[in-house]
Amino acid sequence: MKIIGLNGSARLKGNSAKLLAEACRGASDAGAEIQIVNLYPLNFKGCRSCFACKRKSNFYGKGCAMKDDFTQVMNDMLAADAWIFATPIYNGHMSSSMSALLERLYFSHCNYDAHERMVEREYRSVVIYSMNGNQQFMSKMGIENSCKYDAFLLEKGFGACKYMVANSTLQFDDYSKYHTAAVPVELKTKLSAELFPQDLNRAYELGKELATTHEP
Ligand SMILES: Cc1cc2nc3c(=O)[nH]c(=O)nc-3n(C[C@H](O)[C@H](O)[C@H](O)COP(=O)(O)O)c2cc1C
């Protein structure tokens, strides 16, 4: 089986990239072929509500009509068997790049004719989020609801979706180089040293499970 891993962070060595790499390693260990796509270098925006994907025409059911770098990504995703998304939380949601992808992927495949999927086969997925805030903050601010909604769209449009959130991540290698006087750096560094390896492990297991449970 083939799995596409999508990195929704501009930082190619950041938390999302590391978590994605582990999830893909898990999938690879389970026998999957992996393709990684970094979204930030690509040139595409979100849905512009043209509704070409919903018009009564020969194009109906063929995905997003806008032609740009997303077109190849969408084609690659539909030619693969499963997807792993990794994104930082920006302002309480997935990054703008990942959000643009999901808008176009989901909307062009959401069915207004019937309550059933438009794709002919199931695409399972895993979404991995990472964020500065801890679990309490995430719950208090309703950020988990945002993650649940992404999973709901992916399930509705494509197939079973699982997600995980890596909380309390580090933003910099060396906090002393940045204006972070209000950040409890020592505590944060200690917490992250404990939690991030566990999150990498969770990502690995989710990737492995994704590759293992796939039914063509
Ligand atoms: C523009 C921006 C917005 C952010 N918004 C949030 C936020 O709303 N909540 C939060 O906990 N962390 C927030 N963060 C922190 C990142 O989510 C966190 O550092 C993440 O692990 C970065 O992932 P990366 O290394 O893959 O880029 C934000 C960071 C940036 C740059």
Image: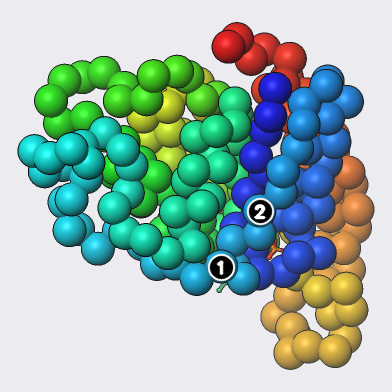
Identify which residue is drawn at 43% across, 40% down: 150
Q: Are marks 2 and 1 in contact (CB under 8 Å)?
A: yes
Q: Position of residue 116 (x, y in %)?
A: 26, 18
Near-viewer residue (78 or 86): 78
What is the crowding at mark 2: few (fewer than 14 residues within 10 Å), some, or many (at least 20)? some
Residue that carries the numbered disc 1 in the rendered image: 42
Secondary structure of the residue carrying numbered label 1: loop
Near-viewer residue (111 or 91): 111
Quadrant where the C terminus sits is: top right
Q: Looking at the picture, which amino acid does disc 2 mark?
A: Val
Near-viewer residue (137 or 64): 64
Q: Quadrant of residue 57?
A: top left
User: What is the count of numbered marks?
Assistant: 2
Left or right, residue 88 beside residue 205: left
Left or right, residue 91 beside residue 58: right
Label whose residue precedes the other's in the sequence (2 or 1): 2
Secondary structure of the residue carrying numbered label 2: strand
Q: Is residue 214 visible?
A: yes
Q: Position of residue 90 (x, y in %)?
A: 53, 64
Q: Is residue 88 visible?
A: no
Identify which residue is drawn at 60% across, 44% down: 85
**Rendered position, 13 above or below 21:** below
Left or right, residue 15 beside residue 140: right
Q: Looking at the picture, which amino acid does disc 1 mark?
A: Leu
Q: CA distance from mark 2 to mark 1?
A: 9 Å
- The quadrant where ligand 1 appears is bottom right
- Which scheme is used to colour this image of the protein? rainbow
**Rendered position, 78 above or below 35:** above
**Rendered position, 97 above or below 108:** below
Residue that carries the numbered disc 2 in the rendered image: 37
Identify which residue is drawn at 56% across, 67% down: 42
